[in-house]
Amino acid sequence: MRARIFGFRTTIFGAITAVLMLSMIGCELLEPALQMATELGVETGYVSRDQADSINKSAAAAGKTVEDITPEQEYYIGRSVAATILGRHRPYNNEEANLYVNQVGQSLALASDRPYTFGGYHFLIVDSPEINAFAAPGGLVLVTRGMLKLCKTEDALAAVLAHEIGHVQAQHGLKAIKTARLTSALTLIATESAKNMGVAEVAQVAEAFEGSISDITSTLVNNGYGRLLEQEADSSAVIILKRVGYNPQALVEMLKEMEKQLKPGGLDFAKTHPDPEDRIDFIRQTIGSSPTVSAAPAVRKLRFELAMGSV
Amino acid sequence: MIRWKVLVCISVILLTAGSVSSDGGYMSVQVRTGQVRLTPSFLARVVELVSYGDQVSILQQKPGWAEIKTARGQQGWIHESALSDKKIVLNPGQGDARVDASGKEITLAGKGFNLETEKEFKSKHAGVDFASVDKMEAIKMTPAQIQSFLKAGSLKSSEGDVR
């Protein structure tokens, strides 16, 4: 009799283990099945409630990725990243210039593959002579006065902003969060209901949030996204610029301008982005032999000069 | 005997697992406020506003857009970037949603990365500037204003059918 019960117990554990292993190799449909199997184990008394919870948590942890960050979480992460950068560089209080940058930026965002985010796209000029631009998750884009001074036309400004929108649409900021941090926090958030969360768990979530902000901010400010993600943002920028009717060649012109101005080993864009020359080659291939865009009309030139003249 | 019963039960659960998480023709609103429009265009008249977590039934899809029916019975078009195929379940008065263990359903947990987490973050970092973030978010433009800006600059207006 004892042997038989032992065998029965082994069968249940065997079944749960098999489902667990299958769910870990990416068959997400099996997770509800696993939960039902563990429930059955609990009901028949062969798995304790703690064991069942632990099995379900392991399965949930196996699949946690950037995809599992909710739009609202992305929004709050983005706000804190932007607030951190704005704590280091003050905003530039020129209402007219900020409105104009938003007109250009929001026009581009509407033509992107992701025109809507939880809180929408918003742009702000930062009062810094450094040549830089930052995209916080969810669509909060910061661009320095130093960068704007390099832009000689609305098309050039559009090129800079379209590149940043490229980072937002592909969620590059969220991808900078260390996987281990994401796994532990999201698993905790996903498996504990509010009333079950003790002081320790709440502190753990806060710590994970803090760590995520720090991962993203240091990527934006110090390390950069790396060549592949920058290329992805450049490709998206070319597509968006073409859709709106801006000259995609403006992105190449901007990079040439940056190459002239950036100091090797400088603390700004040069530190976080690949060599402009490499990017220019890639962008030229991406643009291909698209029809030449006619020169910008007078209205576009005039409104650019009016809004950006004093920056 | 009991062993076979359990094995049969587990097999049935596994065989039906696919249908447990499938969700038919419903999607969830994944932006704070979504505009339901008369036709699939950013310029079309807004017929209803939907909120984060609202479930809508999908009537048909076109590149970039979905024709939906809201819970109140209103039909209209919404841009697909405002929708998620994950089910978002919200409880009134609580904080953020979460993605459930299956990854298919976003349900509510009282604690997440939300306003409370932001407040705590703010209290620990004296230098951060949320006031400027709020100001930044206050700069809003309607699609109509964007269209006239584009038109004035001889640029193309997007209809959202960008895929």
Image: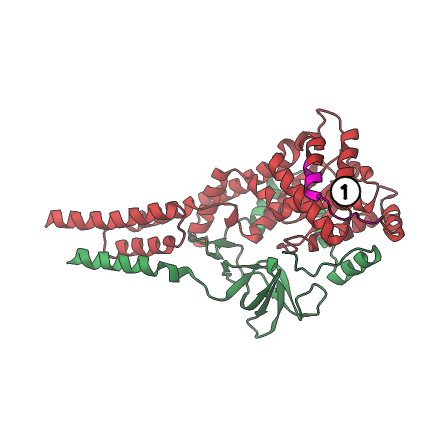
Chain colours: A red, B green
What is the x, y in percent for residue A140?
68, 47
A241 and A6: which one is in front?
A: A241
Instruction: Identify the residue at image location x=83%, y=54%.
Output: B153
Q: Which residue is mark 1?
A: A249
Label 1 packing within 10 angstroms: few (<14), some (14-19), many (20+): many
Determine whether, in the image, residue B14 is placed left or right of residue B112: left
Element assignment for label 1: helix
Quadrant the C terminus of chain A occupies: top right
The answer to which quarter of the image holds residue A86 is top right
Instruction: Identify the residue at image location x=65%, y=60%.
Output: B161
Which subunit holds the residue at mark 1?
A: A
A103 and A78: which one is in front?
A: A103
Give the residue furthest to the front.
A289
Give the residue furthest to the top.
A265
The vertical placement of A290 against A223, above or below, is below
Q: Is residue B135 in view from this perspective?
A: no
Instruction: Identify the residue at image location x=32%, y=59%.
Output: B15
Q: Which amino acid, by three-letter code, is at mark 1?
A: Gln
What is the x, y in percent for residue B54?
55, 64
The answer to which quarter of the image holds residue B82 is bottom right
What is the x, y in percent for residue A57?
38, 47
- Numbered range of the magenta stretch: A282-294
Does the stretch in magenta take in A292? yes
